[in-house]
Image: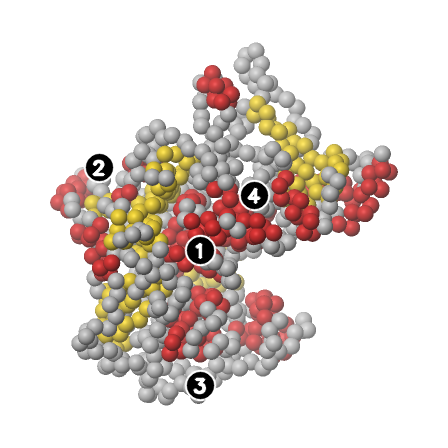
Amino acid sequence: MATDLGELLVPYMPTIRVPRTGDRVFKSECAFSYDSPESEGGLYVCMNTFLGFGREHVERHYHKTGQSVYMHLKRHVKEKATGAAGGAISRRRNGKVFLDLELNRDFNGVDYEYEDEAKLVIFPDHFEIPLPNIEELPALVTIACDAVLNASSPYKKQEADSWEEEIQVSKHARSLRQQENGVRIPPSGWKCAKCEMRENLWLNLTDGSVLCGKWFFDGSGGNGHALEHYKETNFPLAVKLDTITPDGADIYSFDEEEAVLDPHISEHLLHFGIDMLQMQRTENGHHTDNDVQPCVSDWEVIQESSLKLKPVYGSGYTGIKNLGNSCYLSTTMQVLFSIPEFQRAYVGNLQRIFDYSPLDPTQDFSTQMAKLGHGLLSGQYSKPPMKSELIEQVMKEEYKQQQRGISPKMFKALVSKGHPEFSSDRQQDAHEFFLHLINLVERNSSGSENPGDVFRFLVEERVQCCQTQKVRYTQRVDYLMQLPVPLEAASNREELIAYESKRKEAEENMRPPPEPVRARIPFTACLQAFTEPENVPDFWSSALQAKSAGVKTSRFASFPEYMVMQIKKFTFGVDWVPKKLDVSVDVPDFLDLNRLRATGLQTGEAELPDLTPPIVIPEDTRAPEIDESSVMQLAEMGFPLEACRKAVYYTGNMGAEMAFNWIIAHMEEPDFAEPLAIPSYMEPDLPSPSFPTISALDNQPPEESISILTSMGFPRHHTIQALKATNNNLERALDWIFTHPDCEDESEAMSDTADTDPRVRDGPGRYELFAFISHMGSSTMSGHYVCHIKKEGRWLIYNDHKVCLSERPPKDLGYMYFYRRLSSC
């Protein structure tokens, strides 16, 4: 028999691999569905690619790749037998188990036992070889099978590889001397002290300077002023401002040229007025403020936990398991897949997407979106318990409505890949994730329908110079409407004043605080605050050719098919502690925004001249210094010298490793080995700095940013348009350029209106509420999200894996609201 098995496997031996370090073995989840070893058909793991497939998808992989040998894994879940005393009888562990396969937590480990079965299956004849079968199988096959069975979860491996292995404590952390210069960093409104950059800002921990980082080939960074400051002062440590949380922050050592840890970071930040320890981690893993919780009943009201809610099952009623602070993702995806355009783009094209998926479908966005959409909408993973199970549960007085939901591990790993926040296990902002996902949809919709366009609309911004009264109208693309919360407009203002007085009195007399009072804000007041003029910081008036006071108002140049509205409940206190405004807003079921339609230039209005601010030329316009030691390290590897110089230049002299990554990403480009062309501040098509001219915006994109993009081969007018459309964010501008390859000429591009943008689906501004996402907790870094969605005329609550009919949808406590356009007005 041993000879027979050996001979049977001989033709397939070249395709059977032993997993190497770095190989991911997917033995708990199908790449195309949520089938697992616990599913009826089990899971098939390819012995060459180590991808997992459910029974209905394994044939597709076999026909596409020709791989014939799969390991079939099946977990049998059985209820433990009970003895005379009623206790579970212990049984010896079955020898055939998947040694690192995670248990399904839907089954209580005390009441259930698991028996695992593994066998090799050879396609197309489905010849089966039970495992283990050490004596009869070739040694290579036995080793490969053992390695697969003992492989760790790919998600565990990813976490282990990405956290804390290489980051070391800085040698400067203990001895850092901070200047007593009285610098206090505000919780918002930062910008680089040497340029206008407002993103990727770093706080020097010695003197409190706020400066921008260096731009890298991946689009991140700034103009390198933080590094310049280090070269001038030798102040070694800096912290990235937007990464500060109670758990730590991103810290970089310019001297050590790497990311580092600072055990004293809380003290170093407190020196500049930033108190990162005002929030503490509770036992359940959520963050909570030391202050009194704004309203404990939020959790009960929003989750409707005091009511006996009826579970629902079937198509569109599938929950999503919480992976640990992943509810921001779950609620967002539940709402998106309740929208027909998303259903049609991914679930409607399911077979085409699966058939044309790449060899590794776990890394394909469209495949994983289709998989998630099908999991939520098919009803396959939302089936009511069998009648016999219900009777048995009632007899045991343990009646529970089992709703398992689907586990989005593969999806979360893909959409959060490379993102410093979403790739962590911390709680995140659902609003930020929504925009992140829309960006991913846009990137991956080239040549096909982009369902994200249903949210796309144009905002008309009117900027007025307060001295000359002259105006300028511009437009930008947006995907959601942010409504401010004017606390001064609270309808129960007197009650709030009385509560605050009682709270202070209780604090002074060391008595328990009174019951919190929630501010009730009229929705009309929020809408009015949205329309109010706002001051423009650092406004440069082209009429005066100098900085002046300016105000800006915003209106809708178009209305989207679906309007997303965010209530701006989150803010920062003066101590940098994130705060959530405890407010109730009477958000309406029907919304009419037609009165906010943009009107364009009005009769009698005078336009601001089409001039640009003077270009500030750096004192030293010579070619920047290039770290020749890094250049030589790369050249010794065999790369062309000029390519090495470009790599070091474009990665900001941050070391040979960073430059090597740049080379790998650009070595296929035709000008890879061409000499480095340093962008000039006095290009031929630029006017003399003393005679400012052409620009469509008062705030012309920074010339450094324009130079960086033009040096990559993009036309100047295209880069200016991209920067303006993305608020001067280099990474987003680069994405914008790639997603707008057929850009019109400059004069036409500057008039980006609903008439010239085919992706804007303008229509009437009347809407009906169909979903909202609510947040419980004191900040975006803590708490829990649930969503309510209206389907078939009834409201439902989606709370992780549980889906129930809603009895009292708390519309006044929502955070993000989703409206669909009314078909007739």
On the image, the x and y values in percent for residue 474 come to 31, 71
Q: Counting other residues with Cα less than 10 Å from the Cα at mark 2, is it few (<14), some (14-19), or many (20 or more)?
A: few
Give the mark nearest the N terminus, 1 or 3: 1
Q: Secondary structure at mark 3?
A: loop
Q: Is residue 703 visible?
A: no
- Residue at (57% x, 49% y) in the render: 351
Q: Amino acid at mark 3?
A: Glu
Residue kind at label 4, given as amino acid type: Ser
Give the residue number, with chain letter if any, for mark 2.
515
Which mark is on residue 33?
4
For this view, does 428 lie left or right of residue 297? right
Q: In the shown orientation, is residue 602 left or right of residue 777?
A: left
- Comparing 703 with 223, the one in front is 703
- Chain-order first, disc 4 or disc 2: 4
Q: How is the image coloured?
A: secondary structure
Q: Which is nearer the eye, 166 or 679?
A: 679
Are the residues at dot 3 and dot 4 in contact (C-beta closer than 8 Å)?
Answer: no
Q: Are marks 3 and 2 in contact (CB under 8 Å)?
A: no
Distance, label 1 to label 3, CA atoms, is: 41 Å
Residue designated by label 1 = 451
Residue drawn at x 77%, y 35% is 133
Residue at the (33%, 64%) spot, across then down = 458
